[in-house]
Image (cartoon, coloured by chain):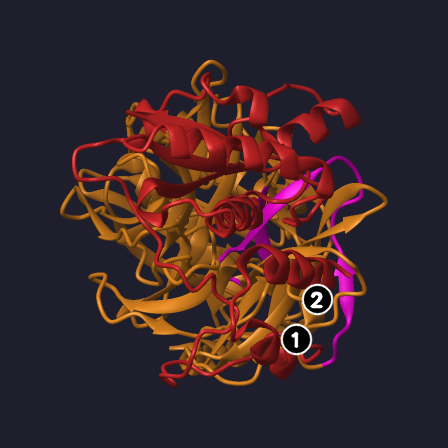
Amino acid sequence: MNQLLIKGLSLFAISVFLSANFATAQIEITQGNQYNINAVISGGADASKATAIIQNDFKMHGAFNVTPADSAQFIAKGTLTANGLTGTLSTASGQVFTKNFSGDWRSATHQFTDAIVEAVTGLPGIATSKVVFVVQKTTKPKEIKDLYLMDIDGGVVRSLTNDNSLNLGPKFNKQGNKIVSTSWKSGYADTWIIDLAANNRSRVAFYPGINSGGSFSPDGSRIALTLSKDGNPELYTIGANGGDPQRLTRTIGSEATPVYSPDGSQIAYVSDDRGAPQIYLMPAGGGAAQRFNTFSSYTTEPDWSSDGKLLAYTVRTAGTFQIAVSDIATGQQSVLTASGNNETPSWCRDSRHLVFSRGGKLYLIDSKTKKSVQIDNGLSNCSEPNASK
Amino acid sequence: MKKYLYLIAATLTLGLAACSNSHKKIDGDGTGGTAGDGGTLPLDSNVAMNRLPDGVNPDSADYSVLQAYIVHFDFDSFTIKASERPKLEAVAKWLSENPNAKLVIAGHTDSRGTIQYNVALGERRAIATRDYLLGLGANSAALTTISYGKERPAQQGENESAWAANRRAEFGVIR
């Protein structure tokens, strides 16, 4: 799919070059480029709302400036239909594509955005991404946190749990149809899986002690998590239905927040075995762990990008918590945020954007430009966002 | 440093025969170990973890009875400090006088640090507290641990006093 796409884009690049109206740089697949786009949806009662949605999609993405048609490099025209939307992307030199997108008007509009982003930047679009997150409903005398789901632009907010208890750390599987999280619904910290398609929830790990911080393997067959059943919080993997625990670590400290590499071969996690928490990498089946240098004495919450090349994490610096990204091969680090306390970075599927929380609000940030936008979902006290891949 | 303090505490309180030898093996080499090697578990508490009997929810525990004995911790540490030992001795005595009672030991952290790491750290504090009580002769079947991470602060606020109050292990009584 990717190869085909790149081939298609190269042909497109050549054709535009030949047309001489555009420099080839304007559609080279270069991250960090800015594109001027005019986007309008017509047809029916929802057209103006759909136009606002697609324009907001481009603004949130950050690589696009929404402009009037006469200064736009790209013209996006959509028409709402009974089954969804028909969308056309063109440049001054001609049409790039015409495609049909099915679903309700909002979903079809996000699909149109993603098709444009992919055609122009070569990276997957993120407008169709979902975000699962935590909302603190009450504080003392009883703290209640529940899980919610939304579109990445803050639309279509939906409650997933209503437990009169704590729910923490929701994470999507790669397919985006299941969510693993920690819930205190039973009174204890157990690992639960929500099946979005079947609209049900099951408790998969409830060993004595904590069963927390789980994440799915890329093929969905296993969950890596922290169990303390053997007398210390350590990393284990279990089958996705809860059985067959395999122990991965054996330290005097605590291990937390394991995440798989996208090829499933490695796990990144946090351990405080040497004092303050640090990120380590180890083979997913167990074995020697290596500390990952983040130039910080306190580093937590690793998340592995979909292309396998980058780790995002949270560092404590000067008493505050900031989001940073490192290139795994070179070790080169980029600190993305500068103020406040920022938590829980989660990669979007394009390995470029991340969602995170700060002060009860959720944000989308572009790791290339470090520009962030608040995701307006109308809710307060939000935390632990996780984006579908 | 934390490691050595813990070793001293573990040796003093538990007196586990295999403890100090097996610790030497991993000293200084960081995280490691192999899954499923079937060997001993030198770093674990060596005493089985418990849950309360079916149908008894730890949320029903009464934390007021032993609130005078809440154990406090230093930042990012699960070491039982010398100042806290008299409290644990008092709890052990209470347990011996109330042989039918069960205790939920709830570990908590301050608001600094990230959510999931704090869940693990809170559990580490609960287990360290439990193990100290076991060293004083408490019956393991009477003790259940739980962690709330930083989710249930004793005191609201972002200051030293609130942070210190929130780094704790509390005892909830189930009768």
Left or right of A135? Residue A200 is: left
Q: Check chain identity for marks 1 and 2: say if they share one.
A: no
Query: Mark 2 falls on what kind of element?
Result: loop
Amino acid type indicated by mark 2: Arg
Where residue A331 is drawn, which disc sits there?
none
Depth check, front residue: B69 or A26: B69
Label 1 lies in what chain? B
Residue A143 sits above or below residue B114 on the image: above
Rendering quarter of residue B113: top right
Pointers 1 and 2 in contact (C-beta within 8 Å): yes
Depth check, front residue: A29 or B42: B42
Residue B150 visible in the snapshot: no
Identified at 70% across, 23% down, the residue is B162
Identified at 57% across, 58% down, the residue is A92
Is A339 inside the magenta-drawn segment?
yes
In the rendered image of the structure, the colour used to display chain B is red
Residue B16 sits above or below residue A2 on the image: above
Magenta region: A330-356
Instruction: Point out residue B110 in the picture as x, y percentages from the top left corner.
Output: 65, 34
Depth check, front residue: B8 or B50: B8
Mark 1 sits on what residue? B30
> Which chain did the image draw in orange?
A
Residue B85 sits above or below residue A219 on the image: above
Instruction: Point out residue A226 in the picture as x, y percentages from the top left corner.
Output: 43, 59
Rendering quarter of residue B7: bottom right
Mark 2 sits on what residue? A274
Amino acid type indicated by mark 1: Gly
